[in-house]
Image (cartoon, coloured by chain):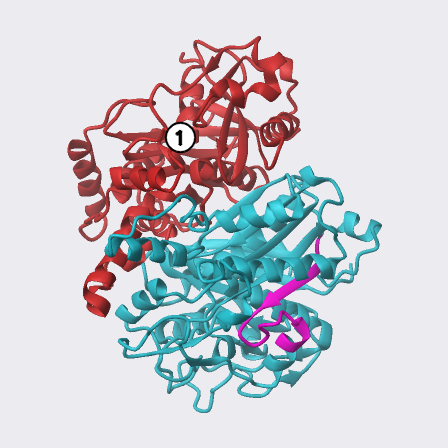
C-alpha cells in the first residue's frame, strides 16, 4: 500500500461537448486564456485543434488548483497521453508530399506530427520546466499518463504533475478504422482532460477535489483482472471496499467486467454517457468519478481497455463538496 | 533510485551490425567505422541531401518487412536482449514483467503505404494498418514474450529511448514490476526524412558533431533493448549483472517546439537531477555519452549544459557522440547510447566522436576526436535531447554494488 496522490485541480474540455464536463464554448474561453498568457510573453497563436483543447484544459487544471501561470521553475511536470489525436495531422502532412513532392513537406506542420509536441506546447505556454512525458497507449494513453505521473509524485521524483489525455479525431479517422476492419464506438471531436496531481501530504490543506489511491496495468488474456488486482494491491484496498465502477472501454461493458462478475454485481457500474473520446476517455471517467463523490461516497474503480495496449485500472476517491 | 535496478541483458541492431551481433556493434564503433551512405530504403532522388545510416531491408527477412521494418528491427534486438539475459519467453511471473518502448515514428511506413494507396484510389483491405499505431510494437513484443504487466510506449522525440529506460527503471524501483525490457526503435522513412529536409537540418555527406565544419545530421535507424531487473531478483536467479541504472531525470526546456534552449537549461537540469537521483558527485563521472547530433544549436547548447551540470569537471571528463557513426536513430538513439556506456564500463574503452578534425571553438571540451580511448569507466552519464524541449539523462554505473 502506498500513499494516495491528491487531485488538486481538474481541467476538462470537450468539443463538441457531451459526456463528462460541460460543453465548451472554445471560441469564447480560449481567447481569454491566450490573452492572459500573452500579457507575460509573446502573442500566442495555436494552429491545431488538439493544441487548443490541451492548452485550455491544462490552464484550467492549474487555475483550479490555484497555481498561477506562467509557472516557471521545475516544480510542475507533465505526463500527457496522446496517440490517435495527431493522425489527422500526419495524414495531412504526408498528403502534401504525395501531392507536391518535397515542396509539399511543410516545415511548420512537421513538428506537429510527433505526439510530444502537444505537451511541448503546454509546457512552453505555461512555462512548465519539470519532467515531460508523452505516452501512446491508444484509448489508454491518458490512463498510462496518469499512472506515470502518480508514481512520479508518490516517489518524490516530481513535486507536482499535470497529467491526463488529449485527442482530436475527425470523421476520416473513424472511416479509416472501419475500412481496415477495426470500427469502434469512438466519436469525432476533440477533448482533453488533465489533472494537477500533488502529494497528499503537501501544503495546500484541503485543496483539491479527490485522491488517486492506486493504479496498475495489465496485458494479455487476463488483462482486466490483472490490472484491477494490481491496482487494489497498490492502493491497499480490498475489493469489498470498492463502492462503484466506471468502465471506459468500447464494446460491451458487461463482457469487460466478466472477470469481476461476482464483485461487479454488488456495486454500481457506470459508463460515460458519451461515446469514447480515445486518449481522453479514461481521464474523463476519472474526473466524473471524482466529481460524483456526493453520490458514491467511497473508492471508485475506473477500468479501461485498449485493443492493443491492454487494460488499466485506477482507484479514485472524490471529496464531497462542503 | 530507492531500489537497485540492474541491467542483465542487451540487444542492439544497427547499421553497423545488421546481424544483431553486439560485439560487432561495439568493435565497429570503437574502430571508427561509419554507416552513413546513400539512401536506399526509398526513392530520395528528389531531395537535396540523400544520406542516412540504414539497415538493408533485405536483411529484415519477413514477408511483411516492407511495411514493418521497425517491428522487424525491434523483434531482432528484443530477442537478443532476452537471450543475453538468459530469459526464456513464458518463464517467471508474467504479471511482474513488461516492456517500455520508445519510438517517434513507430509504424509510420505502414501509414505511408495506406496514404499512397488512397492517392491512387486503391482501397485498403482489413489489417492494412495493423502495424501503424505507435503502441503496436510494444504490444507485439509483449505478446511474443508472454508479459502481462505494464506495456508502455513513450514518445518524447529524440529522448524517447532514454526516457523508456528511465520510466522502466522507476517502475522497478518503486516496486511495480520485477523485470522490464526497455528500449527504442525507429526506421528511416520518407515521412521523417522529408521533415528534416524541409527544416534544412540534414547533411549531404558526414555527421560531424562538435566540429567547426559540421553540415547537419543524418537519419539513422535500428533498435536496442535492455533487460532491467530488480537487483535482488537478478542476483537470486544468478543473472550476470552488466551494469545498473543508478539515476535518471527528465526536464522540459519550455521554450521552443524545434530548437533547444540556447544555454542548455533543460539538459543541464536533467543531468543535474540524474546525478542527484543517483547520489553522484560530478567528479565521479568518468564518461559522458553526448546527444551530439552535429547541428549547431545542439552542439553549442550541449557543451554549455555539460559545463553547467559538471562544473570544472566538465573540462576533464571525456565526452563523445556516436552519431557520426550511426546517424540519428531517434527512438533507438538513447538506448544505443546507453549500450555504449555499458560496454565502455565493461571494456574500459571510450568510443570516439568521428569526423572531428577541426573542433568548433564554442565546443571546447574533450570530445575524444576520431580515436577510441582506453580508460577506466565506473560511472557514465548519457544525455538525450529532442524536439519540444525534451531532455533526459541517465546515470549508468558498473555492476558491482
Q: Position of residue B5 (x, y in %)?
A: 69, 52
Instruction: Give the camera-side residue of A3 and A11.
Output: A11
- Residues drawn in magenta: B5-25
Q: Determine the residue located farthest toward the bottom in the rendered image.
A: B357
Task: Say whether residue A275 is magenta.
Answer: no
Task: Say whether residue B22 is magenta.
Answer: yes
In the displayed structure image, the side of residue A50 where residue A196 appears, left or right? right
Q: Residue at x 54, y 12 (%)?
A: A243
Which element carries disc 1, helix, strand or loop?
Answer: helix
Q: Residue at x 60, y 26 (%)?
A: A228
In the displayed structure image, the side of residue A249 where residue A190 appears, left or right? left
Which residue lies under the disc numbered 1?
A281
Q: Position of residue A224 (x, y in %)?
A: 58, 28
Quadrant placement of the C terminus of chain B: bottom right
Q: Is residue A22 above or below residue B259?
A: above
- Residue B85: name its quadrant: bottom right
In the displayed structure image, the side of residue A21 where residue B279 appears, left or right? right
Instruction: Give the camera-side residue of B363 and A207.
Output: B363
- Residue B283: name its quadrant: bottom right
Q: Colour of chain B?
A: cyan
- Count numbered badges in the picture: 1
How would you rate the neighbour count of disc 1 (Cα within 10 Å): few for under 14, some for 14-19, many for 20 or more? many
Q: Kindly indicate which chain is depicted in red in the rendered structure.
A: A
Amino acid at each position: 500500500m502506498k500513499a494516495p496522490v491528491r487531485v488538486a485541480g481538474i481541467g476538462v474540455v470537450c468539443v463538441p461537448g457531451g459526456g463528462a464536463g460541460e460543453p465548451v464554448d472554445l471560441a469564447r474561453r480560449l481567447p481569454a486564456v491566450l490573452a492572459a498568457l500573452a500579457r507575460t510573453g509573446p502573442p500566442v497563436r495555436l494552429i491545431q485543434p488538439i493544441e487548443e483543447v490541451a492548452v485550455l484544459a491544462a490552464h484550467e487544471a492549474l487555475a483550479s488548483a490555484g497555481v498561477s501561470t506562467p509557472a516557471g521553475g521545475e516544480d510542475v511536470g507533465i505526463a500527457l497521453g496522446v496517440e490517435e489525436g495527431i493522425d489527422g495531422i500526419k495524414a495531412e502532412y504526408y498528403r502534401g508530399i504525395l501531392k507536391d513532392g518535397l515542396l509539399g513537406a511543410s516545415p511548420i506542420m512537421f513538428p506537429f506530427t510527433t505526439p510530444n509536441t502537444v505537451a511541448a506546447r503546454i509546457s512552453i505556454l505555461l512555462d512548465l520546466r519539470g519532467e515531460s512525458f508523452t505516452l501512446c497507449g491508444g484509448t489508454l494513453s491518458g490512463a498510462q499518463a496518469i499512472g506515470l505521473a502518480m508514481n512520479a509524485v508518490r516517489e518524490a521524483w516530481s513535486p507536482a504533475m499535470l497529467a491526463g489525455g488529449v485527442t482530436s479525431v475527425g470523421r476520416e479517422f473513424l472511416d479509416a478504422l472501419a475500412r481496415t476492419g477495426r470500427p469502434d464506438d469512438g466519436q469525432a471531436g476533440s477533448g482533453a482532460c488533465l489533472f494537477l496531481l500533488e502529494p497528499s501530504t503537501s501544503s495546500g490543506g484541503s485543496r483539491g477535489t479527490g485522491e488517486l489511491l492506486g493504479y496498475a496495468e495489465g496485458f494479455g488474456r487476463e488483462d482486466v483482472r490483472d490490472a484491477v488486482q494490481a491496482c487494489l494491491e497498490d492502493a491497499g484496498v480490498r475489493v469489498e471496499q470498492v463502492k462503484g465502477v466506471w468502465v471506459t472501454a468500447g464494446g460491451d461493458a458487461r463482457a469487460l467486467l466478466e472477470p469481476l462478475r461476482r464483485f461487479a454485481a454488488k456495486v454500481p457500474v457506470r459508463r460515460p454517457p458519451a461515446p469514447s473520446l480515445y486518449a481522453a476517455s479514461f481521464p474523463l471517467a476519472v474526473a466524473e468519478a471524482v466529481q460524483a463523490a456526493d453520490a458514491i461516497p467511497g473508492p471508485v474503480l475506473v477500468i479501461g481497455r485498449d485493443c492493443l495496449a491492454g487494460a488499466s485500472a485506477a482507484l479514485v476517491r472524490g471529496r464531497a463538496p462542503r | 533510485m530507492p531500489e537497485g535496478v540492474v541491467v542483465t541483458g542487451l540487444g542492439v541492431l544497427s547499421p553497423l551490425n545488421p546481424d544483431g551481433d553486439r560485439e560487432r556493434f561495439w568493435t565497429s564503433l570503437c574502430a571508427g567505422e561509419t554507416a552513413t551512405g546513400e539512401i536506399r530504403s526509398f526513392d530520395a532522388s528528389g531531395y537535396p541531401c540523400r544520406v542516412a545510416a540504414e539497415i538493408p531491408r533485405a536483411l529484415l527477412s519477413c514477408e511483411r518487412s516492407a511495411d514493418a521494418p521497425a517491428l522487424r528491427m525491434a523483434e531482432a534486438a528484443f530477442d537478443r536482449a532476452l537471450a543475453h539475459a538468459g530469459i526464456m519467453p513464458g518463464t517467471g511471473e508474467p504479471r511482474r514483467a513488461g516492456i517500455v518502448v520508445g519510438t517517434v515514428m513507430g509504424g509510420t511506413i505502414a501509414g505511408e503505404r495506406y496514404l499512397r494507396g488512397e492517392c491512387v484510389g486503391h482501397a485498403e483491405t482489413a489489417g492494412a494498418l495493423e502495424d501503424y499505431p505507435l503502441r503496436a510494437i510494444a504490444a507485439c513484443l509483449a505478446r511474443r514474450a508472454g508479459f502481462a504487466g505494464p506495456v508502455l510506449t513513450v514518445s518524447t522525440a529524440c529522448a524517447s529511448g532514454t526516457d523508456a529506460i528511465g520510466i522502466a527503471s522507476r517502475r522497478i524501483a518503486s516496486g511495480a514490476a520485477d523485470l522490464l525490457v526497455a528500449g527504442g526503435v525507429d526506421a528511416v522513412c520518407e515521412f521523417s526524412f522529408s521533415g528534416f529536409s524541409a527544416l534544412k537540418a540534414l547533411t549531404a555527406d558526414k555527421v560531424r558533431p562538435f566540429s567547426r565544419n559540421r553540415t547537419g545530421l543524418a537519419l539513422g535507424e535500428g533498435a536496442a533493448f535492455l533487460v532491467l531487473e530488480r537487483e535482488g531478483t537478478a542476483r537470486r536467479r544468478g543473472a550476470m549483472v552488466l551494469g545498473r541504472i543508478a539515476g535518471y531525470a527528465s526536464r522540459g526546456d519550455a521554450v521552443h517546439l524545434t530548437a533547444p534552449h540556447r544555454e542548455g537549461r533543460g539538459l543541464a537540469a536533467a543531468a543535474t537531477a540524474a546525478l542527484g537521483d543517483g547520489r553522484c558527485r560530478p567528479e565521479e563521472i568518468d564518461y559522458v555519452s553526448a546527444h551530439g547530433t552535429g547541428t549547431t544549436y545542439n552542439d553549442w547548447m550541449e557543451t554549455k549544459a555539460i559545463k553547467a551540470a559538471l562544473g570544472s569537471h566538465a573540462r576533464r571528463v571525456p565526452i563523445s557522440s556516436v552519431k557520426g557513426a550511426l546517424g540519428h536513430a531517434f527512438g533507438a538513439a538513447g538506448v544505443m547510447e546507453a549500450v555504449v556506456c555499458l560496454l565502455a564500463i565493461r571494456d574500459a574503452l571510450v568510443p570516439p566522436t568521428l569526423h572531428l578534425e577541426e573542433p568548433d571553438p564554442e565546443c571546447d571540451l574533450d570530445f575524444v576526436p576520431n580515436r577510441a580511448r582506453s580508460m577506466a569507466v565506473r560511472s557514465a552519464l548519457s544525455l538525450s535531447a529532442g524536439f519540444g524541449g525534451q531532455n533526459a539523462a541517465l546515470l549508468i554505473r558498473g555492476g558491482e554494488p
